[in-house]
Image: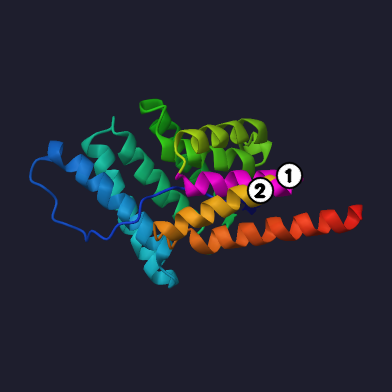
Amino acid sequence: MQIKFFIGVAIAAGGMLLMPMPSRAVDAGPLLAKQALEQCNQGRLATDRDKRLAHFQQGQILSEQAVASDEGSADAHFALFCNLGELLRVDGESLTSLFGLRRMMNELDRTLEINPTHIDALSAKGTLLVKLPSFLGGDSEKGEQLLRYVVKQAPKAVNAKLALARVWCQRGRHREAIVLATRALAIAQKHQRLDFIPEAQAVLQQAKANATKTKERRS
């Protein structure tokens, strides 16, 4: 079974190379979680399939080690969610494994269980809720509420802005979607978020096209 979906994660860009694992496991968790998130981000930037796959697989290994080192680390669980999710869509935004989806969602839910205010996790949760069908746990209204909250609490959350702009576009609120997508693009360009710039441009273009069509139908 294939179900179209989008996994939106707001991971800060980074360039740290994989470093040796510290000798004390208790000290390893935060570093491993950080490295795992960086692997996820680097994989999202990579254009070659094999390189993307290698980054996400390495990220999964590192994040699983981080969780084993500190099961109560929200960042470790979020890093695992990120890499598992990207592995699911490495060949396109389609889902072929319900088990994989459940595991991914469990890691996201565990992140929020540990830290209910984890902005990146809230953004990802909101994005998934508006994209997934109801029988897989989707809830468009709740997802929009979460995205609104993230945008309010974290004005630089590009991914949340884009996800919310898509929702508004689907609901005919094209002008508001244009404003939000324009802001998201400006933030992505200012902070060199290369992983989000093409996406922001696409959302903005779609919102403008929809607004034009709506205006033509009314004229």
Mark 2 touches mark 1? (CB < 8 Å): yes
Residue drawn at the location 65% of the way across and 52% of the way down: 178
Above or below: residue 131 compared with residue 94: above
The residue located at (56%, 42%) in the rendering is 128
What's the mark number on residue 177? 2
Residue type at mark 2 is: Ala
Q: Is residue 21 above or below residue 42?
A: above
Q: Is residue 96 visible?
A: no
Instruction: Give x and y (percent) for residue 4.
Output: 64, 53
Residue nearer the viewer, 158 or 74: 158
Can the viewer see residue 38? Answer: yes
Horizontal relation, residue 157 to residue 66: left or right: right
Residue 194 falls inside the magenta stretch: no
Numbered range of the magenta stretch: 156-175
> x, y (%) of residue 26?
14, 36
Depth order, front residue of 95/93: 93
| Residue kind at label 1, given as amino acid type | Arg
Any mark on residue 173, and which? 1
Q: Which residue is outermost to the right?
A: 219
Residue 43 in percent (x, y) is at 39, 62
- Does dot 2 land on a helix, a strand or a loop? helix
